[in-house]
Amino acid sequence: MAVPLDAKFWWGEGERAYARSIEQSEAEAATLAETPEGRLFMRTQAAQRIKAAFDRELAGRLNGMRPVRVEVTMDDIYISSPIQQILIGASFRMKGSAKLVDARSGEVIATNSNLTITAAGGSGMLGTMVDRAVAGDPIDRLAANLAESYRGWLLVN
């Protein structure tokens, strides 16, 4: 799982998590997140969550004689902030690509160059609170939906 350096990336919660991780004020989170260290922290966090979702979704479902691995690259991650969700509504998306690769030879078996998922969440104060309580962290929800979508695409192709 990879999130390239030049990926479009907006994830306010990741910015705030980075500020907390270096014991800085969340009020400075957006500025701190623009540093190379901040972007690396957020890319790593997002990659770990997306990898975990793919592992959960694909584990035990790709059964065959040929060992394979899935290589996922995310080019665009957008998770609207809770304030945006309250004021204008929620909008979440992830875009990227995925390859199914022979683990021994490196041969690409199947490619999905348009791996995309979008989701809406609650809006307004109550809707945002309920959405987070019921559906969980938007990045985890998107990652799970993305992995499920890829599994569906892969099993059809």
Image (cartoon, rainbow, N blue to C red):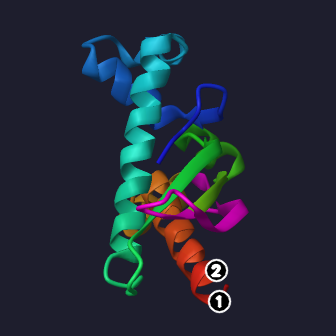
Q: Residue 97: percent from the left, percent from the top?
A: 66, 55
Q: Residue 15: percent from the left, percent from the top?
A: 45, 26
Which residue was labeled with disc 2? 153
The residue at the point 51 percent across, 33 percent down is 12
The residue at the point 26 percent across, 21 percent down is 21
Q: Residue 30: percent from the left, percent from the top?
A: 53, 18
Q: Nearer the viewer, residue 150 or 8?
A: 150
- Tell me if label 2 and label 1 are in contact, CB under 8 Å: yes
Q: Residue 11: percent from the left, percent from the top?
A: 54, 36
Which residue was labeled with disc 1? 156
How far apart, in angstroms, are the residues tagged by discs 2 and 1? 5 Å
The residue at the point 59 percent across, 33 percent down is 4
Query: Residue 118 lies in what quarter of the image?
Result: bottom right
Q: Which residue occupies the extreme right position in the image? A: 114
Q: Which amino acid does label 2 sit on?
A: Trp
Q: Is residue 21 magenta?
A: no
Q: Mark 2 Cα within 10 Å, few/some/many (few <14, many 20+)?
A: few
Residue 137 can be seen, yes or no = no
Task: Give the SS element for disc 2.
Answer: helix
Residue 123 can be seen, yes or no = yes
